[in-house]
């Protein structure tokens, strides 16, 4: 299937939630699927967490592979490595990361999963966490900050650009992450989803035309691996999108 969610529609349903990692109030938004899950289910799962100023989430892992987009604010990760918008993280299932510390203006991040399953965090400061570990490639990769175009430069771009966010020489499966840059009304065919585990198209700047509607900032389209390639068409202001492909190993076995 193909799943579509307008960023504006999703953000209109933003809610105050209690962080399971800190016990503090912050903000949560659901794009696809449940907020968290401990069972496998069809369809993608995508959520956004908006951390309070100086909030800290301790090291943890999830039972499912995900891309994570740091979309607003700033902070640090791990041993104090800086984070700023727009930065992409890729994490294999059962791969620990953190701590994640928000800066004085907060930190927002989106967790994007191609399937729903075992997304509840397992914290390393809790007893018994090792009982939940499963074999994994243990990749925890963070991109350099992604530079986005100004509105006039993007709108008047003459040629498309397809830029890898991680070194392809270090990837030995179907995972891939690219920035696609298109000028106004330009179009580019997306990847064949059958070569991977499916992919997300995330609107980072400008707008994406889908079924004659222009999807705004932070909208998402999910193309599952049983679909055909998606034509990606820019709106009247152009488009900068993240194209995030998942490895084929993300079957039910990886979620158990």
Image (cartoon, rainbow, N blue to C red):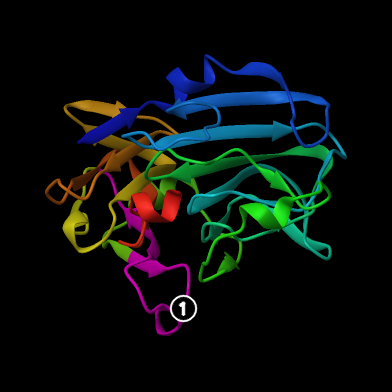
Task: Choose top left, top right, bottom left or bottom right for residue 56.
Answer: top right
- The residue shown at (83%, 66%) is 79
- The residue shown at (77%, 60%) is 82
The residue that label 1 is drawn on is: 167
Q: Position of residue 241 (x, y in %)?
A: 38, 49
Q: Position of residue 171 (x, y in %)?
A: 41, 77
Query: Which of these two is toward me, 189 or 181?
Result: 189
Q: Residues within 10 Å of mark 1 (few under 14, many from 20)?
A: few
Is residue 45 placed above or below 148 in the rendered structure? above
Query: Which of these two is toward me, 25 or 43?
Result: 43
Q: Position of residue 208 (x, y in %)?
A: 30, 38
Asked if residue 130 lies left or right of residue 11, the reply is: right
Q: Which residues are magenta?
A: 162-184
Query: Which of these two is toward me, 80 or 121?
Result: 121
Q: Residue furthest bottom?
A: 169
Any part of residue 126 in sight: yes
Asked if residue 96 lies left or right of residue 199, the reply is: right
Element type at marker 1? Answer: loop
- The residue shown at (35%, 49%) is 252
Query: Which of these two is toward me, 89 or 57?
Result: 57
- The residue shown at (80%, 31%) is 52
Q: Residue furthest left?
A: 228
Q: Position of residue 124 (x, y in %)?
A: 78, 53
Q: Residue 226 magenta-drawn?
A: no
């Amino acid at each position: 299937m193909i799943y579509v969610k307008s960023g504006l529609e999703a953000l209109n349903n933003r809610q105050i939630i209690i962080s399971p990692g800190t016990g503090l109030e912050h903000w949560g938004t659901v794009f696809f699927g449940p907020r968290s899950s401990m069972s496998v289910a069809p369809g993608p799962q995508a959520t956004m967490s908006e951390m309070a100023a100086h909030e800290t989430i301790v090291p943890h892992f999830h039972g499912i592979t995900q891309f994570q987009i740091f979309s607003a604010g700033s902070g640090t990760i791990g041993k104090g490595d800086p984070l700023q918008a727009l930065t992409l993280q890729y994490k294999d299932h059962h791969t620990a990361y953190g701590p994640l510390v928000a800066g004085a203006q907060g930190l927002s991040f989106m967790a994007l999963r191609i399937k729903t399953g075992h997304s509840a965090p397992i914290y390393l400061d809790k007893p018994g966490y090792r009982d939940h570990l499963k074999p994994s490639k243990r990749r925890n990769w963070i991109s350099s900050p992604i530079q986005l175009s100004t509105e006039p430069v993007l709108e008047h771009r003459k040629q498309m650009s397809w830029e890898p966010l991680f070194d392809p020489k270090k990837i030995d499966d179907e995972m891939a992450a690219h920035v696609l840059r298109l000028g106004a009304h330009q179009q580019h065919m997306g990847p064949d989803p059958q070569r991977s585990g499916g992919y997300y198209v995330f609107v980072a700047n400008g707008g994406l035309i889908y079924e004659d509607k222009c999807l705004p900032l932070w909208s998402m389209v999910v193309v599952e691996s049983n679909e055909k390639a998606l034509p990606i068409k820019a709106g009247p202001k152009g488009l900068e999108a993240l194209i995030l492909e998942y490895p084929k190993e993300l079957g039910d076995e990886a979620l158990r």
